[in-house]
């Protein structure tokens, strides 16, 4: 959607396919980082965007055993917004859609599920899709695979996936929030358990982190046992755990960290999770995807106004985004292997790690994780102009 907005803003003809009837799906990435807010500022949309309901997080706080420590301080970032915004992803996507509709070259088809690629002479020439009205064929000079970590586009294109592994899965759920509850977003870590609470004003969005592949065992122990696990980490939630009436109230995210060896084929480019699935650590996935979109528009947008990009030009997007992708994934894997895996595999009482002791003793160090999470490696900036005419064709395929 972000890439479609950027290209339509330039005058490139764009057709977005979305297989659902709307964007209303819970437990997707909802953290809008300062790097993304900076993009909104560069597009002149920030003030209007921030009128949408959202929460602003200026510090990341965690609890290890009984010790509470501030992990990241966003208030010193070199950005216009020195906070992390929490906004439901459907609100974010609806906002981007509404902005893109201002441009005549933007087209969106809901309830249109891509089923295969159109190939001509070893080149991807568009997509086949199923809609409520029947089969749909869209031909395009460039097809964008932006359909997530289980991307059908990358599967049909035969792109090789490098699996980097993940030691955990995440069980997501909602619990109501009371005025007397803590205000901040919080992480609780203790004795083989991790619980993250995201403040949604009216409710808590809760992430219960479990060892990879143990969801069935957890379900066998029963819902009452699961409720007790949560109450042990966040006792103030005990009086509302009956809201988890059955396992249908709890959504399992199977965590994957992977990336494509090559993001493109002639006529096709994958970006976002379709090119590199991220761990939920740091909530960086959506923001990295948006950085991909900006880089893609900067590199390919001018060419799309003239002719179809060459394979080398498509590969230039990957070359531009390889370092931030690998660096972010490397950082996530270090945290997974040295923190998450150890916590989930250890039933002994936890003590505060030395690095968190340093963050507590020297507050200036909190700016480092804030920079890594909030801005990341090699942040992109909008380099493309705004125009009204549409002169070329691009098809963006969305999950």
Image (tube, rainbow, N blue to C red):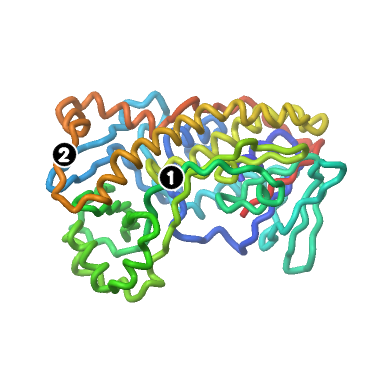
Q: Mark 1 or mark 2, which has the lower sequence index? A: 1
Say which quarter of the image contains residue 125: top right
Q: Secondary structure at mark 1?
A: loop
Q: On the rendered image, what quadrant is the C terminus found in?
A: bottom right
Give how far apart the Cα atoms at labels 1 and 2 are.
23 Å
Residue for point 51% across, 37% down:
288
Say which quarter of the image contains residue 133: bottom right
Kindly check if marks 1 and 2 are in contact, taking CB atoms under 8 A apart as contact: no
Foreground pick, 9 / 70: 70
Q: Residue 301 placed where, x, y %?
A: 71, 31
From the image, tell me which residue sits under label 1.
Answer: 279
Name, please, the residue furthest toward the bottom.
245
Q: Secondary structure at mark 2?
A: loop
Residue for point 74% across, 46% down:
395
From the image, tell me which residue sits under label 2.
Answer: 352
Judged left or right of residue 102, residue 276 is left
Foreground pick, 398 / 219: 219
Q: Residue 62 placed where, x, y %?
A: 23, 43
Foreground pick, 137 / 310: 310
Q: Residue 320 placed where, x, y %?
A: 59, 26
Residue for point 28% across, 34% down:
72
Judged left or right of residue 333, residue 6 is right
Q: Is residue 302 above or below residue 186?
A: above
């Amino acid at each position: 959607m972000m890439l479609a907005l950027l290209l339509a803003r330039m005058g490139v003809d764009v057709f977005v396919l979305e297989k659902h009837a709307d964007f209303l799906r819970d437990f997707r990435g909802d953290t809008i980082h300062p790097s993304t807010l900076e993009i909104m500022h560069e597009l002149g949309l920030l003030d209007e965007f921030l009128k949408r309901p959202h929460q602003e997080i200026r510090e990341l706080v965690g609890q290890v055993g009984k010790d509470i420590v501030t992990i990241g301080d966003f208030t010193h970032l070199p950005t216009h917004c020195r906070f992390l915004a929490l906004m439901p992803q459907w609100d974010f996507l609806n906002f981007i859609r509404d902005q893109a509709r201002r441009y005549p070259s933007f087209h969106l088809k809901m309830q249109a599920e891509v089923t295969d690629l159109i190939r001509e002479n070893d080149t991807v020439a568009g997509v086949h899709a199923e809609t409520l009205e029947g089969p749909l064929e869209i031909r395009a000079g460039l097809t964008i695979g932006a359909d997530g970590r289980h991307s059908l586009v990358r599967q049909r294109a035969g792109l090789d996936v490098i699996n980097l592994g993940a030691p955990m899965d995440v069980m997501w759920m909602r619990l109501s929030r009371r005025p007397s509850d803590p205000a901040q977003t919080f992480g609780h870590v203790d004795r083989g358990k991790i619980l993250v609470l995201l403040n949604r004003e009216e409710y808590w969005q809760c992430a219960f982190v479990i060892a990879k592949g143990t969801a069935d065992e957890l379900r066998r122990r029963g819902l009452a046992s699961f409720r007790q696990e949560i109450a042990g980490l966040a006792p103030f939630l005990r009086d509302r755990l009956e809201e988890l009436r059955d396992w249908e109230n709890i959504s399992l995210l199977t965590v994957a960290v992977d990336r494509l060896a090559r993001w493109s084929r002639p006529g096709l480019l994958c970006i976002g999770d379709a090119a590199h699935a991220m761990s939920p650590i740091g909530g960086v996935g959506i923001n990295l995807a948006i950085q991909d979109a900006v880089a893609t528009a900067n590199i390919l947008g001018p060419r799309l106004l003239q002719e179809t990009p060459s394979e080398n030009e498509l590969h230039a997007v990957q070359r531009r985004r390889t370092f931030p992708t690998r660096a972010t994934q490397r950082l996530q894997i270090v945290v997974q292997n040295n923190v998450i895996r150890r916590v989930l595999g250890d039933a002994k009482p936890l003590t505060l790690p030395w690095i968190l002791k340093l963050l507590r003793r020297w507050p200036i160090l909190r700016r480092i994780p804030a920079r890594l999470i909030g801005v990341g490696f090699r942040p992109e900036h909008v380099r493309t102009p705004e125009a009204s005419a549409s002169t070329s064709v691009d098809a963006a395929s969305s999950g």
